[in-house]
Image: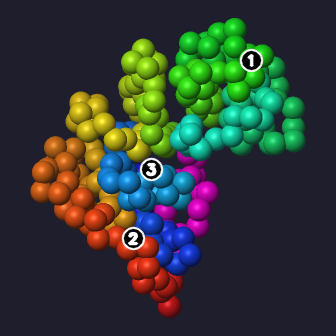
Amino acid sequence: MSLRLTNLTVAYDGRPAVHHVSGEFLPGSMTAVVGPNGAGKSTLLRTIAGLRTPLEGRVEGAAHVALLPQASQLDRSFPISALDVVLFGLWAGHGAFRAVPPAGRDAARAALEAVGLRGFEARGVGSLSAGQFQRLLFARLLVQDAPILLLDEPFTALDERTATDMLTLLRRWHGEGRTIIAVLHDLELVRREFPRTLLLARDCVAWDATETALTAANRLRARHMAEHWAADAERCDRAA
């Protein structure tokens, strides 16, 4: 089943961060979401994941999704082990207050090994490097086993080896037929690895094959739109 956005508007204090966006992510597609800072890219992913409620419009086909959030937005001071972080990915299937069965713990350990963190099960998250922590988030995504994967800046601040390893995982997931939607800033990476691109500047500037979406004219239009954003813009009231 495809993931469809219909007239999607998401707002903060009535002012749109995503404005009347409509389109479709086909099953098994691999789409980059790009645009200037403040374009609503992270808000879009959080809305698809069910973490924000649209002001208008709707998201269809997002019954089972998994979100990899920006690592910089997560509090790593909480005393929790790497294994427990991965086990959180199993809550949807087992419930937050039920013990994870042995098979689930085995799956979590296998996920840690798959991302190069074998032996890190008892390590506190606060002791991990940025690259190790990002690998940990990929391990949590792995155990969720969702058909739709949402990744918010998955390669930011990663060393080359970690980025290469995580990109290999993305290729594997794409080969398994999963739908992958990733917020990215590296346009060369987008052109090389992502067949489709949504260029967002709160409004949808382009949603097409990557080379078509990322023309110089479209990128210039997105930049000009961003330059005219105003903090005191009119509210976008809910339709009657």
Return the residue found at the far top: 119
| Mark 2: secondary structure | strand
Task: Name the residue that disc number 2 marks.
Answer: 19
Residue 117 position in % (x across, y down)? 62, 14
Looking at the image, which residue is at 71% across and 30% down? Answer: 85
Q: CA distance from mark 3 to mark 2?
A: 24 Å
Judge whether residue 106 can be spotted in this image. Answer: no
- In this rendering, the label closer to the viewer, 3 or 1: 1
Can you say whether 207 is above or below 56 in the image?
above
Residue 136 position in % (x across, y down)? 61, 25
Residues marked 3 and 2 touching at CB (< 8 Å):
no
Does residue 52 show up magenta in the picture? yes
**Front residue of this view, candidates 48 and 179:** 48
Residue 151 position in % (x across, y down)? 48, 40
Residue 240 position in % (x across, y down)? 50, 91
Disc 1 crowd rating (10 Å Cα; few below 14, some 14-19, many 20+) is some
Task: Name the residue that disc number 1 marks.
Answer: 123
Task: Name the residue that disc number 3 marks.
Answer: 1
